[in-house]
Amino acid sequence: MILKNCKYIVTQDKERRILEGYDIRIKGNLISEIGKDLSGDEEIDCSEKIVMPGLVNTHAHLGMHSLKGICDDETLFTWLDIVNKEEAKLTKEQVVKNTRDGALECIQSGTTCIYDSYMYGAERIKVFEDLGMRAFVSSTVQKIEDIMHVENMLKACTNGLVKPIIAGHSPYRCSKEVLEKITELSRKHDLIRRIHIAETKKERDDTLKERGLTSIKYLESFGFLGKRCLLVHSIWVDDEEVELMGKYGASVSHNPISNMKLASGSVAPVVKMIEKGVTVGLGTDSVVSNNNLDMFEELKVTALIHKHHWDDPKAMTYQMVLDMGTIMGAKALGLKDVGSIDFGMKADIITLDLNGMLPMNNVISNIVYCANGNNVVDSIIDGKIVMRERKVLI
Ligand SMILES: [Zn+2]
């Protein structure tokens, strides 16, 4: 397959090059050549399109898709009470349907790789495999018996495109014993372990009171921190904790829209985290706390919230934001060959029309500040076209 006459290719390669008028050859699931005057059996005309790496969503709960709009304008703990009651009524069939509906919304708005956490992991793995979407899937663990799901999920993955993650809910929903078991299993199977952490001041204060440690130091105390560790939210962390996150090579999923909507009360110190070597990706969280899955909104809001918070327009640049939405997000999920358009990388690519983006004085600025999910025209995942001219091909 050839992406022909690309008006712009936002490569996200090491030099962050933007190429004009080039072609991209995709062979199997890889990008095999970037050059001029390439030809092949199947060509997609990109002469009026921006071609860029697909976006990576590092935190979602697609199984909640039918609950959009049921609980707005509440703080996290009230929100959890209300939402958990509605979630208890969801059948397995509804969760599978919600996951599919959510995944379709993701594909249509430019996400090619997602980390999705909810119930019925094995059934949800099949949804992503059927759609041909790159995904990491977990069933959220709260009690020790929930951990049994991990073996089932490992068996359920059949095509290499979908992989499991072991996810503890949070320090207030999981005992230390459960979190220790998650750590052990993650090491045994070389899987990413994930936790919602330091999302609210109350959670931070409670952990300090009950465990005598700040949130990240608590995780360190039983070996949870490490390269295969994904910390979701990480808002209420101090400089010492940020230092620790960097020291252990941990990754963070930053979800600014969800955090603002649930009034988490502060801003995750992502700028400091990146300085300390923490890998930070972006996530939408669920549609009940966002309320959509459009990662372009997350790009823009990430740029704005950090400029505003630090009273410094240079605190978060558009390039850094795009990195977080592509290569850093992929790295946070343990993927080294996803997130840029370069020789030998996996072909996870989207194309955008130029609506609302002219004049094109700065391509990346326009992607971050002007584009939205409706600009996405085509989506290619692992070398296969999953959406062509906005029509999902399944
Ligand atoms: Zn979550």
Image (tube, rainbow, N blue to C red):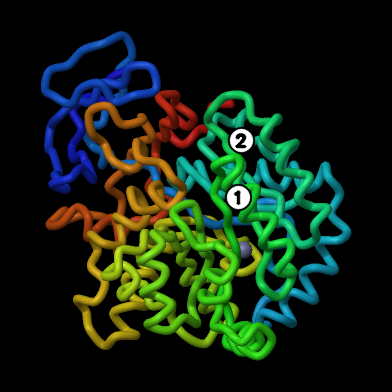
In front of the other: 114 or 107 = 114
Vertical side of 19 occupied by 129: above or below: above
Residue 167, how many percent across, how many down? 64, 55
Pick the quarter of the image with the N terminus.
top left
Residue 123, position as x, y percentages in the image: 74, 37
Q: Report the residue at 18% width, 37% height from top.
A: 7
Q: Quadrant of residue 379?
A: top left
Q: Secondary structure at mark 1?
A: strand
> Could you tell me residue 300's position as x and y percent?
35, 66
The residue at the point 54 percent across, 83 percent down is 214
- Ligand 1 has an atom within 8 Å of the beta carbon of the residue at disc 2: no
Amino acid at dot 1: Asp
Q: CA distance from mark 2 to mark 1?
A: 10 Å
Residue at x 61% of width, y 55% of height:
183
Q: Residue farthest to the top?
A: 41
The residue carrying pointer 2 sits among few (fewer than 14), some (14 to 19) or many (20 or more) residues within 10 Å by Cα, namely many
- The disc at residue 128 is 2
Q: Position of residue 200 (x, y in %)?
A: 58, 82
Q: Check disc 1 and report the residue beneath it.
A: 116
Q: Earlier in the sequence, mark 2 or mark 1?
A: 1
What residue lies at 49% left-to-right and 29% top-to-bottom? 386
Q: Are marks 2 and 1 in contact (CB under 8 Å)?
A: yes
Residue 228 left/right relative to 276: right
